Image: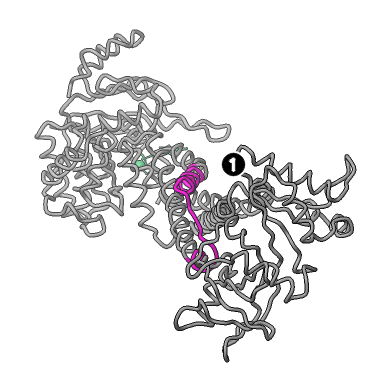
């Protein structure tokens, strides 16, 4: 998982020092701004945000509605690029990457878990989990094995041929988690992962997150639920696009 | 993503909307079908003409009253009718007496439609014409039963007949017709032979005829006038001498008609080349006109496919967002939708081709043997796939350009 850290980072002379700092950490954000142009007015969704996340951390990002959580999450997940600032992930400087380069990073480094699961409705659980491997260019046989294994690890080994509408909410979210993990990403990135689930199922999913964390995965959860945030080992609170608090709770 | 992966995806997406896919493809199907039917009929017609030429023998040609050019318009027809005299048996003797290059020269006379009678059985509207015995050799007449005319039968105007299988089957359902008699206008003719069946061409039966020796025909039906015009068939001894033989025929006829140098021919000579030439000039324009219609259907089909692909992109915005979030690049999305459009229209092309094949079988049974060459089938499917790719280009590009965040927000 650290295969890019030692060598590839040296290829960017301008960012040499930052690389040195960022190399210890999986995620390294430096003075990140995200600005939306609303007519003549500028709306700063994120202002001068800097933080680091080390491998193996379990981080929650909380904050009131409109504070910039989703914006930050999109940046971390490489779905979007910052207006200003540098963002390093696993030794790659992503803040200046093209769309296709970002797609590769998403495929390799990020595993997304969404509030509404975002599974392909027409496809089986197995095919949904195979998707990241398809875009990684893996052959069918190997892909199938890996997807089966990933589904088994979230205790859905007996539901591989089910379609999303034949699964419960909790099961769907577990399919999504299997999909997020199947390509062994550096970070598991979850946006309100329990937002669409009842409290009992939420507890199950949170327990699964803890298990995955114990196995060495790095997890970042964006949430507004305190029960969810309390499970994390570190909580970043943002308000008006700025980091208000960054505290270690475990 | 590799080719088979993309193709599988395309097929499952098309299969998910079976009815819609089918309706989308209707224009395409009709276009390809119309194209292939027209093409196969033209091919069949060509094959028929080629066969006809081969049957006459590529070394033979016809000397007749009119030229193809004379039929250009009413003025030229009227002029030719005034200038070009009807052929006579004396013309034939003149040619025969002086020919040194031409090998065989034989005469035929245009047919009349008559009623045939055998006992109580009658057949109306059957072509009766006349031919010299040597025509059997010049036209390579295939005899099924009996034989063709002899010189004695012609010279003595004997009442004998050579008939087609339709006439034989209808009038002599039992036993061989050879040796039996057919009554035409109260005169009995003895059947001496039956020709091998040729079937129908454009719904025209080729086997409903009675042929008499030329002189018998001339004397019993009122001479070689009007519809019973005389015309001559001649052969060259070899391919190499064909042109010389034609020139000889032309020069002899010009001498016979005492035409001045520079004066137009007052007769026509039709060679197999002229027939192919006529076919080419006829089909040149017909081809373009007839193929324009399917081309328009194809264009409409392409627009419909583009439209449905735009709908598909809008409908599946969320799916595109999900795929992008999991690492699909612009190219992957582009390929996915292009492949879908191409597969869709290739299916349309294939369906059209199959329907054309079925229609071709029906046409072959009723009118004329149709032919779909393999390359035409390949082109039809290839063209429809290319049309699909072109039609899918813009929708696929739109899909590839979608912003992943925006796309994920869609529902
Ligand atoms: N595409 C956009 N164009 C303009 N403004 C935007 C855009 N996306 C977000 N914003 C603005 O940026 C700010 C932060 O939005 P964001 O979605 O990050 O909030 P959030 O913390 O996720 O809120 P919530 O908890 O309600 O989801 C908001 O003021 C929002 O209006
Ligand atoms: Mg949000």
Whether the magenta-drawn stretch holds residue A239 is answered as no
Q: In this image, B305 relative to B209: left or right?
A: left
Image quarter in which the N terminus of chain B is found: top left
Vertical side of B306 occupied by B201: above or below: below
Residue occupied by mark 1:
B238
Q: Quadrant of residue B154?
A: bottom right
Q: Nearer the viewer, residue A31 or A240?
A: A31
Q: Name the element at disc 1.
A: loop
**Residue at horizontal 51 percent and vertical 45 percent from the top:** B387
Instruction: Tally the marks.
Output: 1
**Residue at horizontal 31 percent and vertical 47 percent from the top:** B8
Residue B180 in view, yes or no: yes
Q: Nearer the viewer, residue B380 or A121?
A: B380
Residue B294, given in percent of the width and then of the height, sits at: 58, 54
Q: In this image, B278 relative to B253: left or right?
A: left
Quadrant hosting ligand 2: top left
Residue B45 in view, yes or no: no
Q: For the stretch drawn in magenta, what is the main secondary structure?
A: helix
Residue A188, given in percent of the width and then of the height, sits at: 22, 35
Residue B243, given in percent of the width and then of the height, sits at: 68, 40
Whether the magenta-drawn stretch holds residue B363 is answered as yes
Q: Chain of mark 1?
A: B
Q: In this image, A38 relative to A193: left or right?
A: right
Q: Which residues are magenta?
A: B362-389
Vertical side of B70 occupied by A86: above or below: above
Residue B190, given in percent of the width and then of the height, sits at: 58, 78
């Amino acid at each position: 998982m650290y295969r890019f850290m030692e060598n590839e980072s040296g290829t960017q002379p301008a960012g040499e020092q930052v690389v040195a700092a960022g190399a210890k950490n999986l995620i390294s954000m430096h003075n990140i701004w995200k600005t939306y142009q609303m007519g003549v007015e500028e709306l700063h969704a994120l202002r001068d945000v800097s933080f680091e996340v080390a491998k193996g951390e379990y981080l929650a990002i909380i904050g009131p509605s409109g504070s910039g959580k989703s914006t930050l999450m999109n940046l971390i997940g490489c779905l979007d690029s910052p207006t200003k600032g540098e963002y390093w992930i696993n030794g790659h400087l992503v803040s200046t990457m093209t769309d296709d380069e970002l797609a590769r990073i998403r495929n390799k480094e990020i595993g997304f878990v969404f509030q509404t699961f975002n599974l392909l409705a027409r496809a089986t659980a197995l095919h949904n989990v195979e998707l990241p491997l398809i875009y990684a260019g893996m052959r069918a046989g190997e892909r199938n094995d890996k997807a089966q294994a990933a589904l088994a690890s979230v205790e859905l080994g007996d539901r591989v041929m089910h379609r999303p509408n034949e699964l419960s909410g909790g099961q769907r979210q577990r399919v999504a988690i299997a999909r997020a993990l199947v390509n062994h990403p550096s970070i598991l990135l979850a946006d309100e992962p329990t937002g669409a689930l009842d409290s009992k199922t939420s507890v199950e999913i949170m327990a699964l997150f803890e298990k995955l964390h114990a196995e060495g995965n790095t997890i970042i959860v964006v949430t507004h639920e305190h029960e969810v945030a309390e499970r994390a080992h570190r909580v970043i609170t943002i308000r008006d696009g700025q980091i208000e608090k960054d505290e270690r709770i475990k | 993503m590799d080719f088979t992966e993309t193709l599988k995806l395309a097929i499952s997406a098309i299969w998910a909307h079976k009815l819609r896919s089918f309706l989308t493809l209707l224009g395409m199907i009709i276009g390809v079908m119309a194209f292939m039917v027209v093409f196969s009929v033209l091919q069949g017609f060509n094959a028929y003409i080629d066969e006809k030429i081969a049957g006459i023998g590529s070394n033979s040609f016809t000397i007749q009253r009119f030229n193809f050019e004379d039929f250009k318009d009413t003025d030229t027809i009227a002029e030719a009718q005034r200038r070009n005299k009807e052929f006579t048996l004396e013309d034939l003797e003149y040619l025969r007496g002086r020919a040194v290059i031409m090998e065989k020269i034989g005469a035929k006379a245009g047919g009349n439609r008559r009623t045939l009678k055998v006992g109580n059985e009658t057949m109306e509207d059957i072509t009766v014409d006349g031919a010299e015995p040597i025509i059997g050799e010049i036209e390579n007449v295939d005899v099924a039963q009996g034989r063709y005319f002899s010189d004695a039968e012609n010279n003595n105007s004997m009442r004998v007949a050579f008939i087609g299988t339709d006439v034989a089957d209808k009038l002599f359902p039992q036993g061989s017709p050879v040796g039996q008699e057919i009554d035409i206008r109260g005169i009995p003719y003895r059947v001496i032979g039956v020709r091998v069946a040729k079937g129908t061409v454009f719904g025209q039966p080729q086997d409903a005829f009675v042929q008499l020796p030329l002189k018998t025909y001339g004397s019993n039906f009122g001479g070689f006038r009007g519809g019973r015009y005389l015309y001559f068939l001649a052969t060259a001894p070899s391919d190499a001498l064909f042109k010389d033989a034609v020139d000889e025929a032309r020069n002899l006829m010009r001498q016979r008609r005492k035409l001045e140098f520079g004066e137009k021919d007052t007769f026509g000579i039709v060679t197999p080349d002229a027939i192919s030439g006529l076919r080419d000039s006829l089909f040149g324009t017909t081809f373009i006109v007839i193929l324009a219609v399917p081309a328009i259907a194809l264009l409409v089909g392409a627009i419909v496919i583009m439209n449905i692909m735009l709908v598909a992109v809008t409908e599946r915005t969320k799916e595109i967002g999900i795929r992008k979030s999991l690492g699909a690049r612009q190219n992957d999305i582009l390929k996915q939708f292009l492949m879908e459009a191409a597969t869709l229209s290739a299916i349309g092309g294939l369906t059209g081709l199959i329907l054309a094949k079925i229609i071709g079988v029906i046409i072959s049974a009723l009118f004329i043997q149709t032919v779909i060459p393999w390359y035409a089938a390949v082109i039809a499917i290839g063209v429809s796939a290319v049309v699909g790719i072109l039609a899918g280009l813009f929708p696929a590009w739109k899909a590839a350009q979608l912003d992943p965040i925006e796309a994920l927000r869609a529902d």
